[in-house]
Image (cartoon, rainbow, N blue to C red):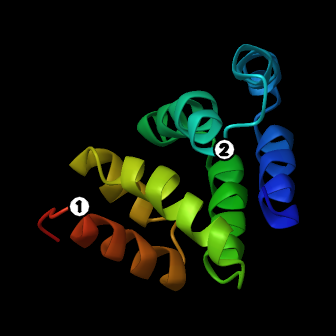
């Protein structure tokens, strides 16, 4: 795990403090930080629910501003992990993606489209 990946995990815990226990349980269960597992099973269900409710606008804006920072990062490991977890999951449900697009910056949008294409999804 790169230092940028570690920073990503810390930042997500800062945004979503309710995930702390699940985050710790995942590490304990797996014996290590499995980035994709934690992002997909701990962080993203909460992010998806926030998008579904579309009520905590301030938090969503801050999360997606951070996602835009991540999308512009030069750490290829972080970009790959981010693309195969966060961005692929955002594209799983059309209505979730449509709502998320209101918050996405240009680079995040570009990477999300690439993630969908890589999965063979219509864009």
Q: Is residue 24 left or right of residue 85?
A: right
The kind of secondary structure element at disc 1 is loop
Real-space CA distance between mark 2 and mark 1, rounded to the nearest whole angstrom: 20 Å
Whichever of callouts 2 and 1 sits on the residue coming sooner in the sequence is 2
Tell me which residue sits at (83%, 30%) in the image.
17
Q: Is residue 33 left or right of residue 57?
A: right
Residue 76, quarter of the rendered image: bottom right
Q: Is residue 107 left or right of residue 77?
A: left
Seen in the picture, residue 59 relative to 33 is either above or below; the reply is below
Residue 16, quarter of the rendered image: top right
Quadrant housing the C terminus: bottom left
Tell me which residue sits at (62%, 29%) in the image.
42
Relative depth, front residue between 1 and 54: 1
- Residue 7: percent from left, percent from top: 86, 57
Identify the residue under disc 2.
35
The kind of secondary structure element at disc 2 is helix
Quadrant housing the N terminus: bottom right
- Residue 103: percent from left, percent from top: 52, 65
Identify the residue under disc 1.
119
User: Which mark, by number, is residue 104?
Assistant: none
Residue 34, quarter of the rendered image: top right
Q: Is residue 36 left or right of residue 63?
A: left
Seen in the picture, residue 92 relative to 25 is either above or below; the reply is below
Tell me which residue sits at (61%, 41%) in the image.
39
- Residue 44: percent from left, percent from top: 54, 38
- Residue 97: percent from left, percent from top: 34, 55
* Residue occupying the far left of the picture: 122
Count up the numbered dots: 2
């Amino acid at each position: 795990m790169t230092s940028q990946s570690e920073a990503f995990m810390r930042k997500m815990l800062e945004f979503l403090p309710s995930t702390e226990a699940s985050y710790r349980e995942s590490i304990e269960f797996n014996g290590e930080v499995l980035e994709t597992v934690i992002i997909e099973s701990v962080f993203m269900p909460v992010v998806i629910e926030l998008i579904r409710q579309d009520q905590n606008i301030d938090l969503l804006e801050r999360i997606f501003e951070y996602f835009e920072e991540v999308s512009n990062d030069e750490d290829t490991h972080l970009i790959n992990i981010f693309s195969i977890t966060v961005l692929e999951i955002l594209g799983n449900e059309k209505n979730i993606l449509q709502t998320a697009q209101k918050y996405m910056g240009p680079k995040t949008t570009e990477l999300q489209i690439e993630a969908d294409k890589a999965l063979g999804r219509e864009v």
